[in-house]
Image (spheres, rainbow, N blue to C red):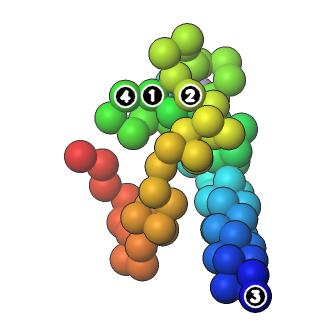
Amino acid sequence: MIRAETILMTDSANQLEKFGKRIQRCYGCFIAYHLKDMYLGEDVTFFCEHCKDDTMFHFDEFSKLMDLSKLDQPGDEHHHH
Ligand SMILES: [Zn+2]
């Protein structure tokens, strides 16, 4: 009777894994990395481990805080506000 919950968890884990495999350019050095190796700064800026500072969250941290379903919307375009 835990089937629905199991599916939900699996779905969320898949989404997280997919999200982690996204390529994102570091805002500091403009080298592309996988998101799972990056750090989140203010204004949804992403930095690599060489450019991050202590105020930023590693992917493992911010992925828990973020609503991934909002980030993964279709029609997601390359502009930042
Ligand atoms: Zn960098």
- Distance (Cα) linking label 2 and label 4: 10 Å
Q: Which residue is mark 2?
A: 57
Q: Which x, y percent locates residue 13?
A: 71, 65
Q: Quick one: label 2 or label 4, which is nearer the N terminus?
A: 4
Q: Amino acid at mark 4?
A: Glu
Q: Which residue is mark 1?
A: 41
Q: Residue at x 31, y 55 (%)?
A: 79
Q: Is residue 45 above or below residue 70?
A: above
Q: Nearer the viewer, mark 4 or mark 3?
A: 3
Q: Quick one: label 3 or label 1, which is nearer the N terminus?
A: 3
Q: Which x, y percent locates residue 51?
A: 59, 19
Q: Are marks 1 and 4 in contact (CB under 8 Å)?
A: yes
Q: Nearer the viewer, mark 3 or mark 1?
A: 3
Q: Can you tell which mark lies on residue 1?
A: 3
- Distance (Cα) linking label 2 and label 1: 7 Å
- Distance (Cα) linking label 1 and label 4: 4 Å
Q: Amino acid at mark 3?
A: Met
